[in-house]
Image (cartoon, rainbow, N blue to C red):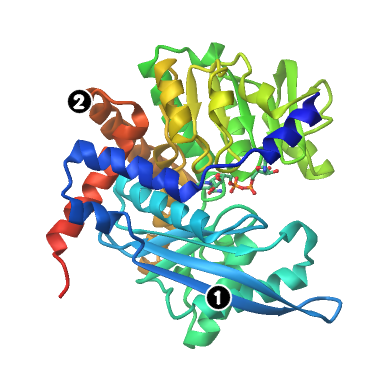
Amino acid sequence: MAQKYELRQMNQPKPNPFDNALEQLRIAAEYLKLDEGLHQMLASPKRQLTVSLPVKMDNGSIHVFTGYRVQYNDARGPFKGGIRYHPNVSLDEVKALSAWMTWKTSVANIPYGGAKGGIICDPKHMSQGELERMTRRYAAAIAPLIGPYKDIPAPDVYTNAQIMAWIVDTYSTLEGYMTPGVVTGKPISLGGSLGRDKATGRGAVFCTVEAAKVNKIDLKKATFAVQGYGNAGSFFAEILQTYGAKMMGASDSRGAIASKTPMDADKLIAYKAKTGSVVGFPGSQPISDKELLQMDVDILSPAALENSILPDTAKGIKAKIITECANGPTTPESDKILHANKVFMIPDILANSGGVIVSYLEWVQNLERIGWSEAEVNDMLEKKITGAFHDVHAASLKHGTDMRTAAMIVGVGRVAEAVKTLGTFP
Ligand code: NAD
């Protein structure tokens, strides 16, 4: 039964993520009464680079991978955004993610613009050597566009601190001096920040804590489920359970599980590290992805990929709060359904901004040649993201909108102001 559903899901046409991003922008532009020229400027990425990456594979053959870097907008500061390795990467996906990064850095009120990168590849079926050669070739190909004052990449889906280290080394070799500030999400030994690995999950928890207060939900009695038990999702679960909330369901690319008794987030992290999946966790039962998303829990976190909450699923969601650790999991159509059903949405550009906030703190430490303790970093993260939550919540009350529209009003509004103030060259 579960498998049949999953196959149907895979065959369903998914909306183009960039169309979703433009639709969200259009709604915000209406509220902000942006004139058509300014709206068009905000709907157009500033620069889009496509690169071909010939890589020597372990069997001696050459495979040419395609990579992208989209620099969306830098009116508020240097471009900033992660790099994704996935077979389904496309230019439209990277464009959408770069637009969301632009609004996200603006909502978080950190001095960055937005960008994103990606390579069409299947890292699960590549050796470390192949991954390193592909990464270095990509770093060399995008080197003219990146730099600590131009564009600062970071990890995203299926990229990590080691991959960032190879980018630092390649870029620094080309530049002729060590440049750790060219990427964030680095290993600690190369200038990475303490607290960066868990920052996205931790930030999402800080937002959830505020949302629970607003919705009068006692976290000690609350239950939750996580779709996509990776970096963002598993640390979200680990930290949320320290507030007393109980995890009843989780999933990854291999399947979903539920349990009648709360599951320990740390034990599930260890189980997935050992077996490669959450599936089969002792005491759990397998369920379908749709059943997971529609579980009777207080808090649901989609923490996998875009378009996971399609309208058909949205109709049956019972959670009172959705914390979007993932980027773009909810389509605009599903948003309408969830809003009508009074689900309190903490939208991606707010909920998962902890990652880029601590990336910013890492970059400041690199540029200033200083180092903060993990407690100091977590403290600054809490202040920044809690402030952003309340800016967005205040906008939602002022304009009478759902939280996503409010986040877009805040994020797009600040970028629009900067673009307008800069003027149009020439
Ligand atoms: P990750 O690779 O560490 O984890 C992704 C997880 O999702 C994996 O466990 C994978 O098995 C699972 N997954 C993939 N397809 C799935 C499916 N169809 N159903 C259920 N699970 C599936 O990646 P991550 O860094 O945790 O990123 C996850 C999401 O969070 C992405 O949308 C990313 O853009 C967003 N995000 C991550 C960060 C960060 O700092 N890591 C920051 C901001 C946003």
Task: Measure the alpha-carbon separation of dots 1 and 2.
Answer: 45 Å
Q: Is residue 362 above or below residue 59?
A: above
Q: Position of residue 90 (x, y in %)?
A: 56, 59
10 Å crowding of disc 2: few (<14), some (14-19), many (20+): few
122 or 193: nearer the eye? 122
Question: What residue lies at 78% left-to-right and 26% top-to-bottom?
Answer: 2
Residue 344 visible in the shown view: no
Q: In which quarter of the image is ligand 1?
A: top right
Return the residue at label 2.
Answer: 398
Q: Which of 244 and 77 is in front in this view?
A: 77
- The answer as to whether callout 1 falls within 8 Å of ligand 1 is no
Answer with mark 1 or mark 2, whichever residue precedes in sequence: 1
Instruction: Name the residue that disc number 1 marks.
Output: 51
Front-most of residues 155 and 416:
416
Mark 1 or 2, closer to the camera = 1
Q: What residue type is disc 2 on?
A: Lys
Q: Name the spot of residue 229 as percent of width and height, x first.
A: 66, 38
The residue carrying pointer 1 sits among few (fewer than 14), some (14 to 19) or many (20 or more) residues within 10 Å by Cα, namely some
Amino acid carrying label 1: it is Val
The percent position of residue 211, horizontal first and vertical second, equals 40, 23
Secondary structure of the residue carrying numbered label 1: strand
